[in-house]
Amino acid sequence: MTYLVTGGAGFIGANFVKYLLKKHPDIQIVVLDDLTYAGNLGTIKEDLKDPRLTFVKGDIKDRKVVTEIFEKYPINYVVNFAAESHVDRSIENPQVFLETNILGTQNLLDVAKKYWTTGKDAHGYPTYKNGVKYLQVSTDEVYGSLGATGYFTETTPLDPRSPYSASKTGADLIVKAYGETYKMPVNITRCSNNYGPYHFPEKLIPLIIKNILEGKQLPVYGDGSNVRDWLYVEDHCKAIDAVVLQGKVGEVYNVGGHNEKKNIEIVKLTISTIKRLLEETPAYRKALKKTGDDISWINESLITYVTDRLGHDQRYAIDPTKITNELGWYPETRFEDGIVKTIRWYLENQDWVKEVTSGDYQKYYEQMYGNR
Ligand code: NAD
Ligand code: TYD
């Protein structure tokens, strides 16, 4: 089987590529990624030595590039991770979110439809090659924000509130439209907040880890009471693999961890875990910017409450019953274990962090957070 994985040099896409290569011996993967600030070829550098993996640099909106891929490779599955993915950036500059997330998705669908169509049925609907599917990687943020109780299910009305989530909702609706209007074999997955290796340090968990190691303050928006449902990235990859191969055509699947935590809890747990790991394994201290044996400064006094995000969604929580019942998927990694694995990975992979933050990152950080 041949997969087109877009956004495969980003956080979840790269983890998915690594997962597929391990899991499926007979696979061919083409990664299409435009290597924006969030994409880094270094993340899949080792994987690219594998003859089963091919990299194409290009924009998902670019008709010519996507067409060339379909001309050259017998694509069975498209898994679309490519997106502008950070809410804070969408508040500053919404337009690129609409362009990439909506128009890029439509371009992929359109080229896939063209290459996968085999003819027409008696009602005039296109018919498709066997064994092809388009999977859109979406987010729970399309459902909006929850109060203190309740969960998002697949039938929760779409109610996005940020430019990012509005653009992801637009993309979901165009995927649905291709499914209904042209009977294209599509699925949509909507997952909660991922965490794990290769997470770009503009998102909460990797940003907090990076700041602790640099002895910087830890910016918590508002009062830190916002709740996210954290999912270990490898569990998410397993869910996508299951939906590509066994998901019922046309269906939406929510993917979540039943693992709700307040932001402030995440930040405190990250501080105490880093400190413990540095105490247990002194060799990890080389990841610290400050030298010396004293690490007593790693404590909750690093936390700084900063101005809240505009329109900050209060709570996300997913009910994953459908994917569990239909496909047998469940989140295997307990948060307590996943966060330790994640922090260890960052302690052991500071070169990666330096590489991905060597470009515009500093400028972005100063604009967002000032010179803390
Ligand atoms: P990311 O920002 O780490 O990576 C996005 C990747 O897409 C990068 O490699 C980037 O170079 C590439 N890209 C961006 N614009 C492109 C374009 N026009 N053409 C080609 N490539 C382009 O994002 P992520 O966290 O890995 O998220 C992947 C997907 O999962 C996104 O669709 C996101 O909306 C969704 N999602 C993420 C989370 C999360 O917690 N990270 C949660 C729910 C849903
Ligand atoms: P983030 O990782 O940006 O994911 P999302 O906004 O898609 O859920 O943020 C997770 C939560 O952490 C969110 O409630 C905003 C908050 N947050 C902070 O408090 N400080 C920060 O510096 C960042 C980046 C996020």
Image (cartoon, grey):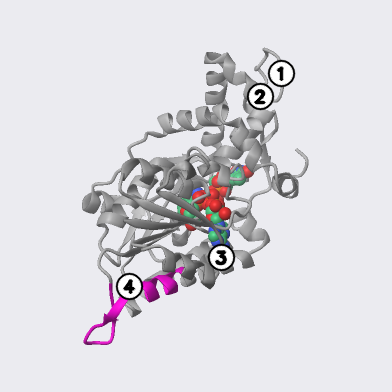
Marks 4/1 in contact by CB < 8 Å: the verdict is: no
Q: Secondary structure at mark 4?
A: loop
Q: Is residue 275 left or right of residue 158?
A: right
Q: What is the three-letter code of the residue carrying label 4?
A: Met
Task: Of the two numbered discs 4 and 2 on the same chain, state the one appearing first in sequence.
Answer: 4
In the visual, does 136 lie left or right of 357? left
Residue occupying image coordinates x 47% and y 28%: 340
Is residue 92 or residue 77 the one in the foreground? Answer: 77
> How far from the left and from the top, in percent, is residue 212?
64, 30
Q: Which quarter of the rendered picture does the C terminus lie within?
A: top right
Q: Is residue 122 magenta?
A: yes
Q: As displayed, is residue 133 above or below residue 322?
A: below
Mark 1 = which residue? 291
Which residue in the structure is indicated by mark 2?
A: 288
Tell which circle, 2 or 3, labels the residue nearer the N-terminal end.
3
Tell me which label, 4 or 3, sits earlier in the chain.
3
The residue carrying mark 4 is 184
What's the CA distance linking mark 3 and mark 1? Answer: 43 Å
Dot 3 or dot 1: first in sequence order is 3
